[in-house]
Every structure is written in C-alpha cells, then in structure tokens.
Amino acid sequence: MAAPAALAPDEGIPATIPGEPLKGRHVLIVVENLPLPFDRRVWQEARTLKAAGAEVSIICPTGKGYEARLEVIEGIAIHRHPLPLEASSPISFLLEYGAALLWETVLAWRIHRQRRIDVIHGCNPPDLVFLVALPFKMLGVRYIFDHHDINPELYEAKFGKRGLLWQLLRLTEKLNFKAADVSIATNQSYRQIAIERGGMPPERVHVVRSGPDLSRLKPVAPVPRWKNGRAHMVGYVGVMGEQEGIDLLIAAAEHIVRQMGREDIQFVLVGGGPALAQLQALSADRRLADYITFARRAPDEDLFAVLSTMDLGVNPDRVNAMNDKSTMNKIMEYMSLAKPMVQFDVTEGRFSAQGASLYARANDPVDLAEKIVALVDDPEARARMGALGRARVENELGWQHQITPLLDAYRQALADQ
C-alpha cells in the first residue's frame, strides 16, 4: 500500500488518506485498560482508520473525565462501560477482566446489530479479547490483535512470581495469537514474541510503533511555578505502578539532595496509578516532599506545561524482562519536545532514544542520580541530545511513519475475507 502524501511532521494525521482504502468497512476496536480518547496510541489508530474511510466504533472502560457511556468524537463512536475496581491483586485482576469481558461481549453484539462489523481490533492487556472475537470470526469477521503488553512478563514484574496464573497468562497469550488473522507489534521485540511464542507467521506480524502525533504534542510556554523556586527541573510522565521504578527515582532524588548537596533541582511526576499513594508516602518519609511534586493524572494543559518546562526527562523503569522488551510512551513524549533524558539501559529504550539519552546501570539509583546531575549541569549536551531525539521522531518514529504499516495490516486481514 502506498504511503500517504508527504506531510510536514506537525501536520499529523491527514483528514482523508488518498484512495480511502478502508471505505465501506466497519472496524470495532476493543480496549480494556484505558478510556478513549485518553489512550493516545489507540486514539491515533482510530483516527487513522477513519481517515482511511472506515467507520470506527470503540469499546472501552469509563474513567475520570470520561464518564459518558456513549460519545461521538471526530466521527468515532465510543461505547464505554464501567469496571468494578482497579486491579491490585491476582484475584482482583480476574474480577476486573471478567467484568470487562462481559461488557465487551454485550456491546460488541449491540454494535454489530446496528451495522455489520468487518474487523475486530483487539488491544491487550488482557489477552482475552479473542473470546469476544471468536463468535464473530465464524461470521467472517477478521480479528487483528494489537499487542500492547507482554502479560506474562507484566504479571511477574507486578507480583514477583510465576505460578498458576502466570501459566494461565502464557496460555491466553498463545490462544490470542492463534485466533488472530493478523497481529500488530509495537516494536521488534514484541514481533519476535508473536512469532516465537505465539506461532504467528512472520509475514502476518506488522510493527506499528507507538509514535507520537506531533500535531497534538507541541511545546508551550514554560510555567515557572512547576520549578517550585528552583533553578532546574526533572520531569517524569507515566504510570505510577510498582514496575515503573518510581521508588528508584525517589532514592536517586534523595541521593542528589542529601549526598550530592544539590537543592536546586525540582522533580515533577505526572501520572496516576495503583502505587501513587504509597510513593507519596515514601517521598514524605524521606523528607523529600518539597523536592518532589506529584501532579497526578493531569489534563493535557498541565502535561504539556511540565514537558515544556523541564530541563530533562527521566525513565526509571526497572530493568526486567517486561521493561527490556517494551517501548515506553514517555520516551517518545520527551523526544517529541526535544528533551534529553536519563534511563536505565534496556533494549527497546535504547533503540528508541539512542543518542537522546544517558543510560544508568541497571536499577542503580546512585548512578541514575549522578547521570541526572551531569546532564543538568551540561546545557550544551542537553540541547544536542534534545535535537537528536526530536529529529528521530520527525524522521522515523512519529505517528505519520506508522500509518502505512497499520493500513498494510488491515489490507492483509481483509484480503482473506
């Protein structure tokens, strides 16, 4: 499939993709863990499919600020359902996933009765959307699996063990790939998992990276209040969970303030998640509350202000099997706004950032602290690294470069009908 006509990087997704290759098709996207349009990757996929001529429907959970059960945005129908709780234990994960699966099934058939579905585009976690898709496959509907997370590794990172539920996750992952007509991987590491662990034919696995839409992720004027009166600012944007390594970042901040004697650096952390309260308590216990601002899950206005104000970003994700193979959105966001970063050395993090990052020793908060301070004190390096990151997004990783592989995946799936 030919690429869309060339656009400037900040023009984003075209309103109409030439030829409208999906015209007359109805796509249902199912996502369980985030509401839309908050999930930036899925929303970019939906807008791209709409621009390619498809009618697009989405099933997703409700969330703060996204309570409407039915909402049409930019011509895309979003059907939201409630979830009983936010999972924090193996049993609660089963309850959450069971409730989501019930709602997804009911809503999918309701949508299908309104207009026949041609493709179900299932996003994990969890690896259970294939159960929604299987009855539709008997009716000729194609199933595309969009592989966002490697759930066995995610479970092990969260709970520090394997066991029966881990084995069940390996099974559902394999069944999900077996049910898929085509799969989409967010990077080459995930592509290898689809082929080697999932048994997918290599030609049916398409890499569609979670590249940012530069038309929507733009710098704004710096907002000095985020610096809390200090000369420098380090930012973090992402989930507040156990595997994200925020405790290591807090330990690094403590080393910077207490051992290195640097009281001129403010840390601002944007995001929500199950470990937020615990991390706030840890910061307070270490007498760092004045140096670390938890901005929680912030609106875009605040998010862009933090990204634009900070001197550099940090990605403290622990080095483990999950994080080593996963591409983190925060890295792309830092690069999009020409911000350098410091992170631990993981395979996909290094592939994405390359020269836009310094790399600390695995899970070593002291080395993380020293590299943060080194970058804070070197404005020329920050400017050079920030420019490298921005160019990499513009030329290779941004969403405009993902449009063609996404549509290629759809072309292949629909060719089988």
Image: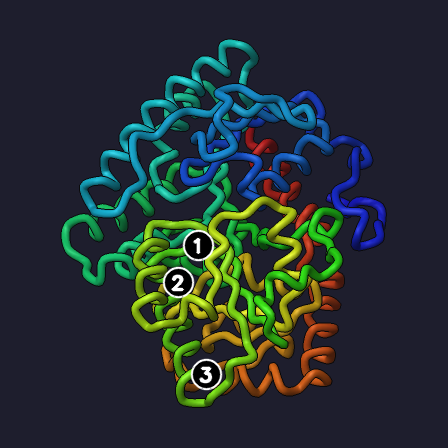
Q: Which residue is mark 2?
A: 244
Q: From the viewer's perspective, is the residue at label 1 or at label 3 nearer?
A: 3
The amino acid on which the numbered mark 1 sits, given as a three-letter code, is Val
The amino acid on which the numbered mark 2 sits, given as a three-letter code, is Glu
Q: Earlier in the sequence, mark 2 or mark 1?
A: 1
User: Most extreme residue toward the front, as rendered?
Assistant: 229
SS of the residue under disc 2? helix
Q: Quadrant of the C terminus?
A: top right
Q: Is residue 226 left or right of residue 384?
A: left
Q: Position of residue 103 (x, y in %)?
A: 36, 23
In the displayed structure, would residue 169 be above or below residue 247? above
- How far is mark 2 from mark 3, CA to CA? 20 Å
User: Most extreme residue toward the left, as rendered?
Assistant: 164
Q: From the viewer's perspective, is the residue at label 2 or at label 3 nearer?
A: 3
Q: Earlier in the sequence, mark 2 or mark 3?
A: 2
- How far is mark 2 from mark 1, CA to CA? 7 Å
Picture disc at residue 239? 1
Residue visible at 45% across and 76% down in the picture: 344
| Residue 277 visible | yes
Q: Quadrant of the N terminus?
A: top right
Q: Position of residue 57 (x, y in %)?
A: 56, 24
Q: Is residue 3 left or right of residue 352?
A: right
Classify mark 2: residues with Cα within 10 Å, few (<14), some (14-19) or many (20+).
many
Q: Is residue 39 left or right of residue 217?
A: left
SS of the residue under disc 3? helix
Disc tally is: 3
The amino acid on which the numbered mark 3 sits, given as a three-letter code, is Ile
SS of the residue under disc 1? loop
Q: Which residue is mark 3?
A: 256
